[in-house]
Image (spheres, rainbow, N blue to C red):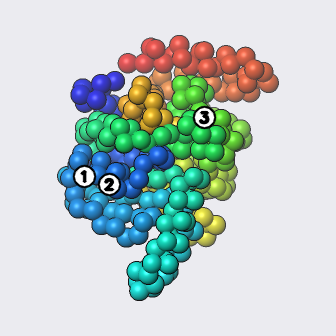
């Protein structure tokens, strides 16, 4: 998928529920770069004004696509910095301690670039940013055994009707084995809980052809079967956007950011691989979009997937992986 041919980046449905072009938020985790190089890559690609909140936290405001954030993904360290008095922050001792914390943290946790919601037709423009980061030493999840770095995609939806939500979830469940194999998920990321798949009972509930809940029951089912944010396709931000009452008492409430998007967390970050770029995980996500947009074909996938999913040897013989790959070749 060429970054220059933007039509190859477009899903079947390009307008959202407000009848404007759909957008995607992108979050990239990586190591190997100093923050000065990262913010320079962002401004070189998109312009904007750099605001340094701390050595762990930057904002790039008023770029031509919106506001970016750059954070060292270490919540405790950011809290330490945020609670210090400005006078103390200016002291030589504090600055030395802060730098020591940063150096230690960079060995364990990633820098994270959080892009603003970008029109899908402009998504390919992030290629220049990814390339700049690679040229400045950015490394991804396969660089070291301790890394578990990912790329998160946050696409908004054509609409927020419950039938649409169910179709997207069904399509993702049917294609999960295919996407997981294509992504070649890093071993360390496999061992972490952050990208857990849905459990068997919930999958069988959702891919039942008779599953036709109203919106409240759809959300109620999701909350009952998925008490954690740790899902490869996390719906909690979307649910919070629909009605925050559903997440008010959630134990991870502080980390749930309401937005009208899915939160797709499965892809690796392979930024140091010259054969990898944003188009690779996005192209796999587009398969979900295409299948969700074809109800008759989705029904065929569901029928075959549901039968296969209940076989005891499915994880050994991988027949559904082969079959789903064949079926995908016939999608229009």
Q: Which residue is mark 2?
A: 39
Give the answer, above or below, for where 142 lies relative to 96: above
Image quarter of residue 134 = top left
Residue 292, compared with residue 231, is above or below; it is: above
The residue lying at 63 percent from left, 45 percent from top is: 146
Q: Secondary structure at mark 3?
A: loop
Counting from the top left corner in percent of width and height, residue 92 is at: 45, 78
Instruction: Tell me the residue that label 1 is attached to.
Output: 43
Res. 210 mark = none
Near-viewer residue (158 or 102): 102
Mark 1 is surrounded, within 10 Å at the Cα level, by few (under 14), some (14 to 19) or many (20 or more) other residues, namely some
Q: Give the Cα separation between the discs numbered 2 and 3.
A: 27 Å
Left or right: 307 with respect to 258?
right
Q: Are marks 1 and 2 in contact (CB under 8 Å)?
A: yes
Residue 113: x percent and y percent? 40, 52
Instruction: Tell which of 84 and 200 is nearer to you.
Output: 84
Counting from the top left corner in percent of width and height, residue 61 is at 26, 62
Which residue is identified by label 3? 186
Query: In this image, 325 relative to 295: left or right?
Result: right
Q: Is residue 255 visible?
A: no
**The N terminus lies in quadrant:** top left
Q: Residues within 10 Å of mark 3 (few under 14, many from 20)?
A: some
Q: Classify residue 180 by image quadrant.
A: top right
| Mark 1 to mark 2 CA distance (whole Å) | 6 Å
Where residue 118 appears, as percent x and y from the top left, is 29, 47
């Amino acid at each position: 998928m060429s970054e220059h041919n933007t039509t190859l980046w477009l899903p079947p449905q390009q307008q959202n529920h407000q009848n404007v072009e759909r957008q995607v938020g992108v979050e990239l985790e990586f190591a190997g770069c100093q923050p000065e190089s990262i913010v320079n890559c962002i401004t070189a690609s998109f312009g904007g004004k750099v605001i340094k909140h701390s050595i762990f936290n930057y904002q790039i405001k008023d770029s031509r696509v919106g506001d970016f954030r750059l954070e060292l993904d270490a919540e405790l360290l950011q809290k330490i910095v945020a609670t210090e008095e400005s006078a103390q922050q200016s002291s030589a001792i504090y600055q030395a301690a802060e730098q020591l914390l940063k150096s230690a943290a960079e060995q364990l946790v990633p820098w994270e670039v959080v892009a603003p919601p970008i029109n899908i037709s402009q998504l390919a423009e992030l290629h220049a940013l990814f390339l700049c980061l690679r040229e400045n030493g950015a490394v991804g999840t396969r660089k070291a055994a301790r890394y578990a770095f990912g790329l998160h995609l946050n696409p908004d939806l054509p609409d927020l009707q419950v039938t649409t939500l169910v179709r997207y979830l069904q399509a993702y469940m049917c294609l999960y084995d295919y996407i997981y194999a294509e992504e070649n998920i890093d071993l360390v990321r496999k061992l972490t809980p952050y990208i857990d798949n849905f459990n068997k009972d919930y999958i069988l509930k959702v891919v039942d052809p008779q599953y036709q809940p109203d919106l409240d029951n759809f959300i109620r089912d999701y909350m009952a079967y998925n008490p954690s944010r740790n899902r490869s396709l996390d719906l909690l931000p979307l649910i919070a956007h629909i009605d925050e009452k559903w997440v008010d008492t959630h134990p991870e409430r502080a980390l749930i950011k309401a937005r009208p998007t899915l939160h797709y967390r499965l892809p690796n970050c392979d930024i140091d691989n010259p054969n990898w770029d944003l188009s690779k995980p996005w192209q796999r996500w587009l398969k979900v979009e295409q299948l969700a947009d074809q109800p008759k074909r989705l029904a065929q996938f569901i029928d075959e997937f549901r039968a296969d999913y209940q076989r005891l040897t499915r994880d050994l013989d991988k027949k559904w992986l082969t079959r789903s790959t064949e079926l995908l070749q016939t999608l229009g």
